[in-house]
Structures are given as structure tokens and as C-alpha cells.
Amino acid sequence: MDRPTEGLRARLRQQRPIPLAAELACAGGELLALVGPSGSGKSTILRTLAGIYRPHEGTIAVGGETWLDSARGIEVAPRERSVGFVFQHYALFPHLTAQENVMQAMGHVPGGERRERALRLLERTNLAGLEDRRPARLSGGQQQRVAVARALARDPKVLLLDEPFSAVDQITREKLHEELATLRRELNIPIVLVTHALDEAVALADRMSILHRGTTLQAGEPAQLIARPASPLVARLIGLKNIFDAEVVGHDAVRRLTVIRWAGQPLEAAHAPQFAVGSRVGWSIPPARILLHRRDRPSRGDHENPVSGTVVRCLRLGDMTSIALSVVAGERSDIFFNVPTHVAQRNGIAPGAAASVSLLAEGIHLMPTAAAPTPGVEP
Amino acid sequence: MDTAALLLSLQLAAATVAILLPAGVLIARFLATREFAFKPFVEAVFALPLVLPPTVLGYYLLVALGADSLPGRGYEWLTGHTLVFTFDGLLVASVIFNLPFAIQPLQRAFEAIPEDVLHAASCCGLTSVQSLWRIELPLIGAGLLTAGVLTFAHTLGEFGVVLMVGGSIPGETKTLAISIYDRVQGFDMAGAGLMSLLLLVFSIVAIGVTFVASARHRRRHGSAD
């Protein structure tokens, strides 16, 4: 986690009332997403960065300034930390117009320049013409933009976004995602986004930090996390469905493969020599690494980890169909994958039908099993 | 109509509001935003005048402010006259027995401000005083009005405490409510009736104004967050 010191670095620890064991690093110009289920402590971490929540122990350094160092007794008050904070429900000042809301954060700007700068910020967040409206007369998306403009008005050293897209409809959300992506290209400060929506994190973040009960389980680039979760728990938290456990039966250093036994059959997986032969491992595979065999003729990839089973669920979602294939009857061994709807129709995919798939070896990622046995797939 | 009593009552009510509103804002804001040991006890003490019989409250104030008490002696040393049976004594008593009428609506109003709005004010760099002045006071407008009107109206009508602490000295401590009582005692039902009607109309108007203003305030700011 080597990051330039101009960015944000934080280390937070506490047992109660909300357990925290989190480490964050975010460089200037980088967007870090804190992802986790409700109650994972992600909002608490964001509030701690802003100084409106005080942890028992920790350090926070932003842009070369120390905001918190509990060991040295340093704690900078929230109003003296240069943060831009966009709250989940925006927390706009309801009695003030959009422009006046933005101007409240401009204590550091000479009085004569505030009005002009607030107008420019509102223009930048696509609110030109709405500066005299109070929050009650703005739509959800417009309120969110005022909140972003107000956060930027402080000329912050770090921008903190607490589920800023959760209170708007899907179309507005996509638009706001684009606006944030544009905005962040112009900002050279660390941006920390709290979200429970994985797709949002993947679309917007340079790095993701997966949180569970206040603890950072894994941090890294979104693609890397999805392909290589550190544990079955991380895999579940980032929404992977194909999570199973198996036994290691051998390693093939030449072909760079590890062979595991799952559901009574051998499977070739990406090489993972760190797991001893005979040990139990967890494994996952992204749906995109599962290929449906054609009924009429076999294709080239069919010899790679062929697995047969019965279709137990088949859900048509527009152009794509989501399929669950039960490999061992009566056990939780369902494999989830998606195919184009016309492919599903052509191959007679329906509940009760037999089907075969290939699990591409490079997509099978091995990981240590959790202390408790991995329950396989959660429906 | 006892004009002197009417003027005295108005003067007492205005002075009570002028002292109690700023003090009430600070106390209510503290109670609404802080958690501390014995908070329910402190809140109960401030609410006590709501349930305590006025004569009981008046008795204790008489003892506490009287010439033999420390505050009474200190006041006499400073001004050369006693605190009880004077307008100043009446004002002190009036501030005390109106505490819940000012603090409770203000505290409810402060509590109704979403916590994140206060956090947003901090994150904007506003100091506690700036936050109070620019953000919180405008948002507790209805609470301020309610506290002011209730305190004013309640002062005009208070009888027991005023009689105990102030007596009934014309032009000094004889308020409208006491004057009404005196008129009835003297079989001047017409005079008592006129003054009662005045208080009745004033009370209706005051409560009406409060309700209308609260509804307007809610309509204006209610759906914003």
C-alpha cells in the first residue's frame, strides 16, 4: 500500500461500539471505493475521516497534514479539516438557496469573491439557472449536485462521498456517475466513495476496499478483486455466486495448473502451489469464465473442465438469460452463469433439462477456506 | 380597567421573554445536542414548574430570594433594597417559572434539525456560533415563536407565584391577573370581566398565531431534507 504522502492515509482501530480495524490509502486524483454490506462500518470510517466520529485509536494524514494521531494526542476539529463531504441525503441547509448553500463553505474566500465563485461551481455541476432555488424546489439529482458543489466550495484536500447516488432513480444515477467521472478528472485530490453497490464501485473506482464488520478484508483494483478474492467471504461480499470448496489433488508446474477434486470429479485450476496437496481450499469462478456446451456439436473448449448437470433455474432478463445448473443432485453445488437468450433457446435450456458447461481453468481461483466450512452457494 | 396593572403585566412579560429566549436557546441547544450523565435529571429540573403548584414554587422562591437568603442579601447589598416584593424579584420569579415554556419548544425544535445538517455545517468550516446564527436559528423559527408566545402569555396569566413573591403592590408588583382577583373580591364584576376578556382574546390570538406560524414554517422547510 505504498502511496504518495500527498494523498490520504488512515489507520483506525477500536473494539466498541462499532468494531474498526481499517487501513486506507488513496492517492491524489484517485477514487477509492469502500464497499461492504450495511453495518460494515464504511460510513463510520468516512465520518471518522471528516472528524465527526471519533475512534478510540488511529491516525489520519491528508495532504501531508496530520488530522488524527491518537498516540500523540492530535485531533483536528472537523471545521478545521479541509474536507468536502457529500452526505447520503445531502444534508443541504433547507432555508438557504443553492447558491447560499455553496457560499457557506467559503469562509476561506474573500467576501467579495464568494458569490461569483459559487455561481461558477454551480455552473460546473450543471445547475446554472437554479442558483436561487431552495432545496425543497430541486429534484433529488439537483440536490445531489448542490451538495457536490458545496463540498468543492471548501477547496478540500479530500472529497468524501457517502452513498451519494442511493437516493436517486436509475436514470439520474447513471447521469451522476458520468458527471462524477468527468469531475474527478479535473480534481487532483483523493476521493473516497462509500457504496454498497458493487457495480457502482467497479464503474467509478480505481481501487476498492472490501469491508466487513469494520475490518478491511482486501483492497485492490476492482478487476483484480473480482478475479482474485482473498477469501470466500470477500468473494461473497463482492457478489460472486460461484463459491465452492474442494480438495487439492496435485500441482502441474509445467502446465501451470493445480488440480482439485470437486463434486467427485477433477478440475484444473489456475496454478496455486501455495496450497498443499490434500488440503481443503475455497474456489470461485466468474460467470464470464463458464461456457455452455452446444447441443448439436462439441466445440473446441469442451474438453476443458467439462461439467454436466440439470438446469434448476432459468431466468430471462431481456437479451440475457441467467442459468443455475445443479451438478450434484441434492447438494448445494449450483453453478451460475449467463448466456444470450437466443443461445439458451437454441440449446433447449429450461428447468429440468440436462446441460453441460466448461469451467475455464484460468478462471478458477483458489483461496483459503474460511475458519467455518464454506457453505457453497448462497441462493 | 386597571391600566397600571395592564402596563405592568406587559412590561413583565416583555422583560421575561427578552431574558428567557436567549438563555433558553443556549440551554435547549445544549440539551438537544449533548449526552451526559444525569441529563434526564437536569431536564426534569427545568420541567419542574410545569407540575409544581404555583404557590409551592412561590413559597420556595420567597425563601430563596428573601432578605435572609444569600441571593437576597447580595441583591440588597448591591441595590440597597430587597428582591422580594419588587418588580425585579417578580422578574426573577417569572423567568424561573417560565423555564419549561421556553426550553421545551426550543429543545424540540433543535432536536428536529437533522444531525447531518449540523455535521454539514462543521464540514463547511462554520464555527459553533456561525452554525447557530446562520443555520440553526433560522431552522428553529417556529420553536422560537412558540417559546416567545407561550412565555409572554403565561407571564400575563400567572397568579400564584406572583402573589407569593411580589405581593400586590400597585404599580410595582400588581399584575393584571392579581388585579382581576382584587376586583372580584371587591364585587367589581364588570371591571374583572373586561380584564378577563382582554386576557382571553390575547391568549386566543397568541396561540392562533403560534399554530399558523408553525404550520407555515413546516411547509417551508419540512420537506427539504
Image: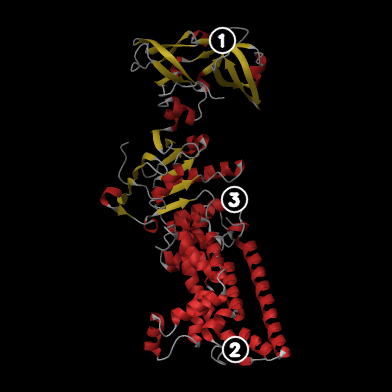
Q: Say which residue label 3 marks.
A: A140
Q: Residue at x 56, y 21 (%)?
A: A337
Name the chain under label 1. A
- At label 3, the amino acid type is Gly
Residue B133 vertical position relative to residue A296 in the rendered view, above or below: below
- The residue sitting at the right extreme is B190
Question: What is the spatial separation of the Cα atoms under label 1 and label 3, in whole angstroms?
Answer: 49 Å
Mark toward the start of the polypeptide (1 vs 3):
3
Residue B216 in view, yes or no? yes
CA neighbours of label 2 inside 10 A, class few (<14), some (14 to 19), many (20+) = some
| Label 2 residue SS | helix
Q: Position of residue A294 (x, y in %)?
A: 60, 11
The residue where tag 2 is placed is: B7
Which amino acid does the dot numbered 1 rest on?
Ser
> Please, what secondary structure does the residue beneath circle 1 have?
strand
- Residue B203 pos. (x, y %): 66, 77
Marks 1 and 2, Cα distance to the nearest angstrom? 97 Å
Q: Which mark is residue A124?
A: none
Residue position for label 1: A308
Tell me residue B204's x, y (percent): 69, 75
Q: Are marks 1 and 3 on the same chain?
A: yes
Count numbered badges in the picture: 3
